[in-house]
Image: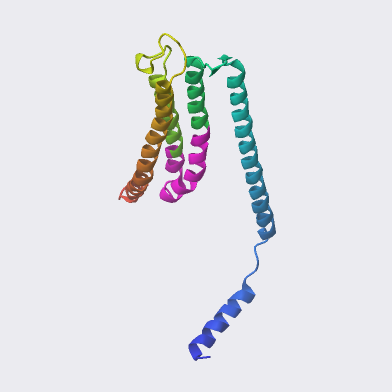
């Protein structure tokens, strides 16, 4: 080996002999394993709840929907209520899902302002649920619509199904666009807050 390599080797060896392992290393490894197991159990519970909920909704629809020799005749309000419940379920699931993966991103963006980052996450959650609540209230119907072509029969039609699918797709599109804008704008806000703290005269 060359002289430089020998010096580098000696420096690394001497540093390695002086370094002592962290006293809580084993505890942190065990805690990490336990956290991973807990996360897997939580995911399994969530998946099981979704399956049970889907099965319960399907059973309720098949049980309470009138039928005859031609098949099921679902009243329009059952699909309306089901769509509203689906929107509510999406809100309750998607919000924590985004928040869980957004914490690390916000912590990195607001590393100079941790409290600001936490407040930003809380305010974003409030805006998120306000958007969902407003969307449901604006799009809910309490009577059959003319364009559904079921004002007389009161049964679900293809036009109503198309409308309800549009409601589901609409909220996903809105949340997707707003979330994308949030991802783009958050680093800019973090940079502005960081520069503001470094201005002369700031504590």
Residue 10 x, y percent position in the rendering: 57, 83
Q: Residue furthest top?
A: 152
Q: Is residue 113 magenta?
A: yes
Q: Is residue 54 above or below residue 74?
A: below
Instruction: Please tell me whether the stretch drawn in magenta is mainly helix, strand or loop.
Output: helix
Residue 70 x, y percent position in the rendering: 54, 17
Nearest the eye: 133 or 50: 50
Question: What stretch of residues is rendered in magenta?
Answer: 93-120
Coloring scheme of the render?
rainbow
Nearest the eye: 101 or 144: 144
Q: Which quarter of the picture shows residue 6?
A: bottom right
x 42%, y 47%: residue: 110
Q: Residue furthest bottom?
A: 2
x 65%, y 68%: residue: 20
x 64%, y 76%: residue: 17
Q: Is residue 114 magenta?
A: yes
Q: Is residue 86 above or below residue 3?
A: above
């Amino acid at each position: 080996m060359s002289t430089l390599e020998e010096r580098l080797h000696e420096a690394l060896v001497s540093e390695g002999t002086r370094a002592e392992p962290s006293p809580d290393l084993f505890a942190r490894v065990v805690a990490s394993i336990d956290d991973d197991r807990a996360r897997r159990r939580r995911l399994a519970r969530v998946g099981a709840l979704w399956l049970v909920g889907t099965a319960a909704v399907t059973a309720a629809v098949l049980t309470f929907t009138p039928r005859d020799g031609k098949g099921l005749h679902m009243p329009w309000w059952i699909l309306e209520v089901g769509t509203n419940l689906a929107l509510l379920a999406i809100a309750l699931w998607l919000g924590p899902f985004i928040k869980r993966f957004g914490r690390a991103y916000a912590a990195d963006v607001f590393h100079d302002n941790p409290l600001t980052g936490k407040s930003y996450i809380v305010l974003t959650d409030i805006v998120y649920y306000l958007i969902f609540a407003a969307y449901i209230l604006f799009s809910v119907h309490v009577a059959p619509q003319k364009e559904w072509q079921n004002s007389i029969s009161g049964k679900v039609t293809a036009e109503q199904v198309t409308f309800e699918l549009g409601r589901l797709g609409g909220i996903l599109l809105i949340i997707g666009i707003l979330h994308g804008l949030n991802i783009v704008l958050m680093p800019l806000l973090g940079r502005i807050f960081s520069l503001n703290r470094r201005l002369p005269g700031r504590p």
